[in-house]
Image (tube, rainbow, N blue to C red):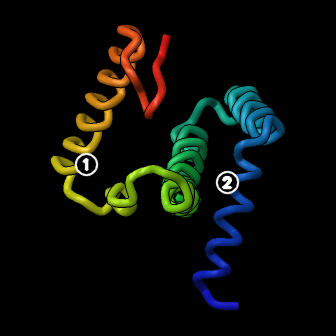
Amino acid sequence: MSVANLFNNVATAVAHAAGRPAAFIACCALIVAWAASGPLFGFSDTWQLIINTGTTIITFLMVFLIQNTQNRDGVAIQAKLDELIRVSQGENHFIGIEHLPEAEVEAFRQRCERAAREHVESEVHGEAVGGRAVA
């Protein structure tokens, strides 16, 4: 198994586990236990450093794991949408627009919005749409 595959498997498992209610409850219990131990340790700087360091490390690592998972999900969703466009009567030149500069993507979005608005207006006025009269 390659390092990339191992990382993907770990990232998926951790992201999945972190999103469960049990993970949230465990984290809350850990915080309560830490807070309850404050008087035992005299609310010392070391006592505070433990929670600060722990949460910082976990947050830092989770950013990369969750971003990896979201990147893969985004690519998979885009591939599915591209396939739906390809096999439908949609315009195939929309495939791959996620790789264009932001201004060009915005131009496509505005074009689609304008076309949808024109379609709704033509239906409201009972004009022919797609070869049939709309009442």
Residue situated furthest left in the rendering: 103
User: Which residue is at a point 67% across and 80% down the rendered structure image?
Assistant: 6
User: Image quadrant for the N terminus?
Assistant: bottom right
Q: Is residue 101 left or right of residue 70?
A: left
Q: Is residue 58 above or below residue 29?
A: below
Residue 120 falls in image quadrant: top left
Residue 27 shows which numbered tag? Answer: none
State the residue in front, 126 or 85.
126
User: As shown in the figure, which amino acid type bears the numbered disc 2?
Assistant: Ala
Q: Which residue is mark 1?
A: 105
SS category of the residue bearing label 2: helix
Q: Position of residue 59 (x, y in %)?
A: 53, 49
User: Which residue is at a point 58% across and 58% down the rendered structure image?
Assistant: 80
Q: Is residue 93 left or right of residue 10?
A: left
User: As shown in the figure, which amino acid type bears the numbered disc 1?
Assistant: Val
Q: Which residue is mark 2?
A: 15
Q: Position of residue 112 (x, y in %)?
A: 31, 36
User: Which residue is at a point 24% across and 34% down the rendered structure image?
Assistant: 110
State the residue in front, 108 or 3.
108
User: Which residue is at a point 49% across and 10% down the rendered structure image?
Assistant: 135
State the residue in front, 37 or 31.
31
